[in-house]
């Protein structure tokens, strides 16, 4: 009897041990499978699970009609072999934040060419604080379908150039303003005040004494602005020359505007009306010319004071990236660019680390 009890007791313990081992094995297997799944998920879907990237969406025709639009274009993705992930530099982001801050009732649309996602850096995260900032991707053939530009874009003549990103941007700014109306700003233009304080529905800015620029443009979606946008767009396609820098940009708007009105040899220092389109003087948008752009980055106290004084009547500042992108400046320096950034893009500046570049 005692032996039988001992046998039963041993059998019970063995069964309990087996059940425990099986339970532990099952738990370990479940943990392993779950962790493998998480690892696989992390590899396959970093943007959704870990918010490394922002998915870019196409322009929504319905949404575009709801508010005044301010367009920025980032076209470096049009280069052959470019990644499908876009990026923004700190000073680019500053320009976007300044537009959002100064124009709260406008929709700030940042257009990426041939990109699918946007890399979310610390300073790009700053822009997500603004509800009026939207990021989009654009495909030239899709956006021009059933428009006056469809056939020309499908011909792919636009790619016959050594300056692909530049000329795609030149084309797109005219096309978007023709199709939707609004304001276009280069990604190196800082807003100092609302676009509406300029007080004009249609404007282009002076580059030099008798030359216009296409870095800052505003056209309405009908009447004079729409007519001029179409004239510029058609001229762009008909006279396109991808070999000559500036031919499809500043030179284009200058030669077309000359057909709208009688041009002075030297533009006046005040606004100039050209058949319903206002030509803004340098002091309003490009007081610091590209030849002087280093002054914005100077730590000389006299240069700082003089530069800020010259900008008192300005609504916008053109940084001329072609000439300033190599100029490094510390975020705690006493320079005009940092003093301006403190007011116009405070969140981006605070997330820029040691250097504002």
Image: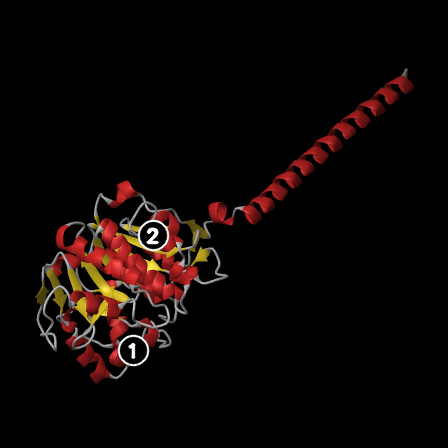
Residue 129, image x, y percentages: 31, 52
Q: Would residue 139 be visible to someone looking at this image?
A: no
Marker disc for residue 272:
none
| Residue for point 29% across, 70% down | 247
Q: Upstream in the sequence, badge 1 or badge 2?
A: 2
Out of 258 and 127, give the one closest to the viewer: 258
- In the figure, residue 60 lies in which quadrant? top left
Q: What element does badge 2 sit on?
A: loop
Out of 279 and 127, give the one closest to the viewer: 279
Q: Would residue 267 be visible to someone looking at this image?
A: yes
| Residue for point 28% across, 71% down | 319
> Circle 1 sits on which residue?
297
Question: Could you tell me which quadrant the N terminus lies in?
Answer: top right
> Circle 2 sits on which residue?
128
Residue 32, image x, y percentages: 66, 41
Q: How is the image coloured?
A: secondary structure
């Amino acid at each position: 009897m005692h032996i039988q009890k001992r046998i039963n007791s041993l059998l019970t313990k063995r069964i309990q041990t087996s059940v425990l081992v099986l339970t532990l094995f099952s738990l370990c297997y479940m943990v392993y499978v779950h962790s493998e799944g998480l690892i696989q998920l992390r590899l396959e879907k970093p943007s959704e699970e870990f918010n490394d990237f922002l998915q870019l969406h196409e322009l929504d025709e319905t949404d575009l009609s709801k508010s005044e639009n301010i367009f920025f274009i980032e076209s470096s993705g049009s280069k052959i072999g470019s990644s499908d992930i876009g990026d923004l530099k700190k000073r680019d982001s500053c320009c976007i934040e300044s537009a959002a801050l100064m124009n709260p009732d406008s929709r700030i649309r940042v257009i990426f060419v041939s990109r699918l996602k946007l890399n979310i850096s610390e300073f790009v995260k700053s822009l997500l604080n603004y509800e009026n900032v939207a990021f989009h991707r654009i495909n030239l053939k899709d956006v021009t379908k059933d428009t006056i530009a469809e056939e020309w874009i499908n011909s792919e003549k636009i790619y016959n150039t050594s300056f692909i990103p530049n000329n795609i941007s030149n084309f797109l700014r005219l096309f978007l303003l023709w199709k939707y109306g609004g304001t276009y700003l280069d990604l190196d233009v800082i807003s100092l005040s609302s676009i509406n304080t300029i007080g004009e529905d249609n404007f282009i800015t002076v580059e030099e004494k008798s030359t216009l620029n296409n870095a800052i443009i505003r056209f309405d979606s009908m009447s004079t602005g729409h007519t001029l946008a179409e004239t510029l767009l058609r001229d762009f396609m008909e006279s396109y020359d991808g070999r000559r820098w500036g031919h499809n940009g500043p030179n284009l708007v200058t030669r077309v505007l000359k057909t709208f009105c009688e041009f002075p040899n030297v533009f006046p220092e005040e606004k100039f009306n050209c058949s319903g389109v206002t030509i803004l003087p340098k002091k309003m948008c490009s007081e610091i010319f590209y030849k002087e752009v280093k002054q914005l980055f100077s730590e000389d106290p006299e240069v700082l004071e003089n530069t800020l004084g010259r900008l008192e009547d300005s609504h916008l500042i053109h940084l001329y990236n072609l000439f300033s992108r190599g100029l490094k400046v510390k975020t705690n320096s006493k320079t005009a660019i940092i003093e301006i950034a403190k007011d116009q893009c405070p969140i981006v500046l605070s997330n820029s680390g040691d250097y504002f570049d």
